[in-house]
């Protein structure tokens, strides 16, 4: 596996870095499959196939060659005591997740999962002021 770097646009101090690195599995020269859930970039989701270019000894994202159909959503929790319960529910629904911190989580919504189910739950968490969320790359469409 190799790190692939994504350039980020910072607006009002967010995200907190100008680049994000994501693991990729090399499939061929300059072609990689994304192997973790992004925290900041909106360019890719887990298992997308991307092409890269080398700059200053690092691999940088060039374009998405094939979408996995997966979608990415980021969640910030306001109530740390509810995080594990909420993540267990998201897993039960069919999502995978990665933690950036104890309260900042990126979730993968597989192509096989109805995104409406996830959005309904996230809207509930937001209405309860337990968490808020933002879209990363959304490949599925809500109806």
Image (cartoon, rainbow, N blue to C red):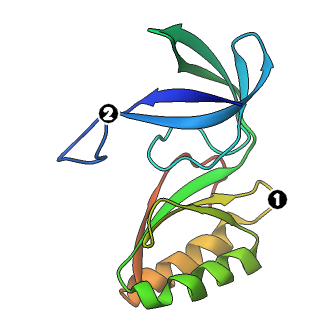
| Circle 2 residue | 18
Residue 14 vs 75, above or below: the answer is: above
Residue shown at 49%/41% (left/top)? 42
Q: Nearer the viewer, residue 119 or 9?
A: 9
Q: Position of residue 83 (x, y in %)?
A: 51, 82
> What is the crowding at mark 2: few (fewer than 14 residues within 10 Å), some, or many (at least 20)?
few
Residue shown at 68%/45% (left/top)? 46
In terms of secondary structure, where does tag 1 sit?
loop
Q: Nearer the viewer, residue 46 or 139?
A: 46
Q: Position of residue 48 (x, y in %)?
A: 71, 36
| Circle 1 residue | 112
Question: Mark 1 against mark 2, which lies toward the viewer?
Answer: 2
Q: For marks 1 and 2, give the CA distance.
A: 32 Å
Q: If the image is split into quadrants, where does the N terminus sit?
A: top right
Q: Nearer the viewer, residue 98 or 109?
A: 98
Residue 29 vs 97, above or below: the answer is: above
Q: Position of residue 54 (x, y in %)?
A: 54, 9
């Amino acid at each position: 596996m190799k790190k692939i770097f994504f350039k980020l646009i910072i607006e009002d101090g967010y995200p907190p870095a100008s680049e994000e690195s994501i693991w990729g599995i090399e499939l061929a020269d300059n072609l990689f499959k994304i192997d973790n859930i992004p925290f900041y970039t909106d360019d890719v989701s887990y298992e997308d196939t991307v092409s890269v270019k080398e700059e200053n000894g690092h691999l940088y994202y060039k374009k998405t060659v094939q979408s996995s159909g997966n979608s990415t959503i980021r969640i910030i929790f306001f109530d740390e005591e509810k995080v594990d319960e909420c993540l267990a529910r998201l897993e039960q629904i069919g999502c995978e997740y990665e933690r950036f911190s104890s309260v900042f989580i990126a979730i993968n919504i597989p192509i096989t999962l109805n995104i409406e189910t996830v959005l309904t739950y996230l809207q509930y968490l937001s209405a309860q002021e337990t968490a808020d969320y933002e879209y990363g790359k959304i490949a599925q469409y809500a109806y």
